[in-house]
Amino acid sequence: MTRFNEYNSLFFVINLFMLCSAVRSDLNADFYKQTCPDLLKIVRKEVKDALKIEMRMAASLLRLHFVDCFVNGCDASILLDGSNSEKFATPNLNSVRGFQVVDAVKSAVESACSGVVSCADILALIARDSVLLSGGPTWKVLLGRRDGLVPNQRGANLAIPSQYDTLDTIISKFANVGLNVTDVVSLSGAHTIGRARCATFSKRLWNFFNTGGPDSTMEKDMLSDLQHVCLVNGDGNKTTALDRNSNDLFDNHYYQNLLDGKGLLYSDQILFNGGDDETKSVVDNYRRKPKLFFDDFIKSMIKMGNIGPVTGSSGQIRKNCRVIN
Ligand code: HEM
Ligand SMILES: *[C@@H]1O[C@H](CO)[C@@H](O)[C@H](O)[C@H]1NC(C)=O
Ligand SMILES: *[C@@H]1O[C@H](CO)[C@@H](O)[C@H](O)[C@H]1NC(C)=O
């Protein structure tokens, strides 16, 4: 009995050790405590100012952290301009926005502590503040990322999920960066804020995968509303709310929408109707338990923020987020 307990606690210690090294990251919340003590305040103020002008900006900024982290890790590669820019990758083209706000935050940070804070860390802080200022949860952002030196447009085309990917493809694109099925469902909850262009969902309204009719999983009133917003051969850049119930509020209503057939993107609705019992049950859990959604969203955001960070002496601290030094 004693021996059993000894083995048991030995295993426990070993497991704990393995777990710690598996999720170990070189990032920490106090990274700039000495070198840029007012960093968090500066970022918060700039994000607040931007949201006063346009509330949707919170969504656009949150999305930037996601599309950055999925390509070459969270290294601010999305911010680099030039012909190989990730801004021109298919999932991002005419779609990602908020770069002027990032520039404004960066220059406010540079005025206070020049050459110290990476653009990648700024994106992570901006994403957290955007969620919080939209009524969502908050968390301590781990810091200490460095900025990458090259954009990867091809990588962006391959790694960033598309709205018409199958659920299996989406799950494997998340798995490729170390995120699991729960992370797929919790992070998709980001679509509780922001807007999407007709070009990204209009196939569902008119000729769904060449069926000659609409996607049968879409709720009928929403379908007819959207058919008036996104006309056949209409303006593909016209936008509508991802969460029609509470567009600017970061809440868990996104999941109720999925139960009601009111997911806007195909990639949203298949989390519930895609034939995967696991995603379906997580959707139902988050719908019923807002606190569980918030807690899991935080965990998944931290996990996403840890994807392939550039640390140590690799990379650099960019002076201007759009170009390498
Ligand atoms: C699961 C795979 C995902 C797919 C297929 C996907 C796809 C899309 C698409 C197509 C749009 C609309 C873009 C446009 O109309 O121009 C969009 C918007 C958005 N996405 Fe995702 N997304 C995914 C995951 C995520 C994740 C993980 C986050 C953040 C954690 C996120 C945050 C957002 C936000 C906030 C918007 C609104 C942006 C705005 O209003 O400017 N998405 N997404
Ligand atoms: C996914 O990862 C989280 C930790 O981030 C863990 O709590 C959860 O159990 C994992 N889920 C699955 C389905 O493996
Ligand atoms: C959307 O707007 C961009 C310019 O911002 C334009 O180049 C593009 O052709 C438009 N796309 C659609 C589908 O109308």
Image (spheres, rainbow, N blue to C red):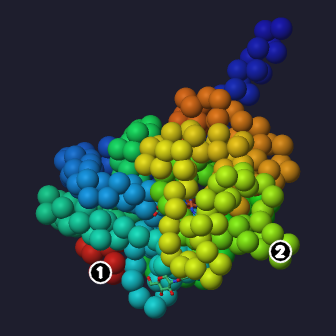
Q: Residue 243 carries which label?
A: none
Q: Residue at x 72, y 53 (%)?
A: 220
Image coords of residue 123 (percent x, y): 38, 60
> Amino acid type of disc 2?
Gly
Q: Which mark is residue 325?
A: 1
Q: Which residue is drawn at 66% across and 60% down?
A: 224
- Find residue 140 and report its image quarter: top left
Instruction: Tell whether 227 sits left or right of 97.
Output: right
Instruction: Tell whether 80 sits left or right of 25.
Output: left
Answer above or below: position of 273 versus 137: below
Which residue is label 2 attached to?
Answer: 212
Q: Residue at x 32, y 49 (%)?
A: 31
Image coords of residue 40 (percent x, y): 26, 47
Of mark 1 and mark 2, the one earlier in the sequence is 2
Element marked by disc 1: loop
In the foreground, 259 or 142: 259
Answer above or below: position of 42 versus 96: above
Q: Residue at x 55, y 56 (%)?
A: 242
Q: Do the residues labelled 1 and 2 touch (CB within 8 Å)?
A: no
Image coords of residue 179 (percent x, y): 65, 53
Marks 1 and 2, how far apart in space?
52 Å
Image coords of residue 42 (percent x, y): 21, 52
User: Label 1 neighbourhood size at 10 Å, few (<14), some (14-19), many (20+)?
Assistant: few
In the foreground, 191 or 312: 191
Q: Can residue 113 be seen in this view?
A: yes
User: Label 2 neighbourhood size at 10 Å, few (<14), some (14-19), many (20+)?
Assistant: few
> Amino acid type of disc 1?
Asn
Q: Residue most toward the top?
A: 1
Element marked by disc 2: loop
